[in-house]
């Protein structure tokens, strides 16, 4: 179990670090991932979470969850309720570095598309 958790957290850090370098991404997590699970929530500025999730799945075949995640009061506190919540990505034991790079690249393309609109 420790080996799986360590691998998932390594990939979570990779995703966090990659997304944090993208202009236009708002991340929602603690900086310290020591006692964290392999989940990252984010939004793209100017887009609703559902639209981002639809693009990730429909165009890039990347599964994610969008919305208030059964925690509407948390989203009110984060200020994400007005954009219908956030996009949530979970890392599992079968994810690879390539999956993470693909997700980061896809989110970068969505940001570029959004800026051109």
Image (cartoon, rainbow, N blue to C red):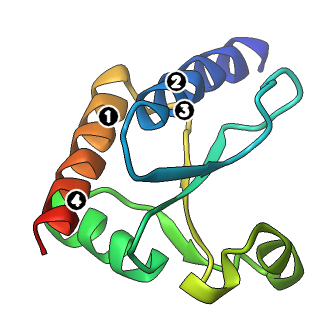
Residue under label 3, please give it: 16
Residue under label 2, please give it: 11
Q: Look at the numbered discs 1 and 2 and tell me whether their residues touch, using CB distance below 8 Å.
A: yes
| Of callouts 4 and 1, the N-terminal one | 1
- Name the secondary structure under disc 4: helix
Q: Residue at x 35, y 70 (%)?
A: 52
- What's the distance in space between the residues labelled 4 and 2, CA to CA? 21 Å
- Relative to 109, does residue 93 appear above or below in the rendering? above
Q: Nearer the viewer, mark 3 or mark 1?
A: 3
Q: Residue at x 61, y 46 (%)?
A: 40
Q: Position of residue 55 (x, y in %)?
A: 25, 70
Q: Position of residue 102 (x, y in %)?
A: 24, 37
- Name the secondary structure under disc 2: helix
Mark sitting on residue 110: 4
Q: Look at the numbered discs 4 and 3 and tell me whether their residues touch, using CB distance below 8 Å.
A: no
Q: Look at the numbered discs 4 and 1 and tell me whether their residues touch, using CB distance below 8 Å.
A: no
Q: Could you classify mark 1 by the number of other residues whose Cα lies within 10 Å: few (under 14), some (14-19), or many (20 or more)?
A: some
| Of callouts 3 and 2, the N-terminal one | 2
| Of callouts 1 and 2, the N-terminal one | 2
Q: Residue at x 19, y 63 (%)?
A: 115
| Of callouts 4 and 3, the N-terminal one | 3
- What's the distance in space between the residues labelled 1 and 2, CA to CA? 9 Å
Mark sitting on residue 99: 1
Q: Quadrant of the C terminus?
A: bottom left
- Name the secondary structure under disc 3: helix
């Amino acid at each position: 179990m420790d080996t799986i958790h360590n691998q998932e957290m390594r990939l979570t850090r990779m995703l966090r670090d990659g997304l944090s370098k993208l202009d236009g991404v708002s991340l929602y997590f603690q900086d310290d991932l020591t006692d964290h699970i392999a989940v990252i929530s984010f939004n793209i500025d100017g887009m609703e979470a559902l639209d981002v999730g639809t693009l990730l799945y429909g165009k890039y075949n990347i599964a994610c969850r969008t919305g208030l995640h059964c925690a509407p009061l948390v989203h009110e506190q984060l200020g994400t309720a007005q954009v219908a919540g956030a996009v949530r990505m979970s890392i599992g034991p079968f994810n690879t570095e390539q999956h993470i790079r693909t997700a980061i690249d896809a989110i970068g393309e969505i940001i570029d598309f959004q800026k051109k609109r």
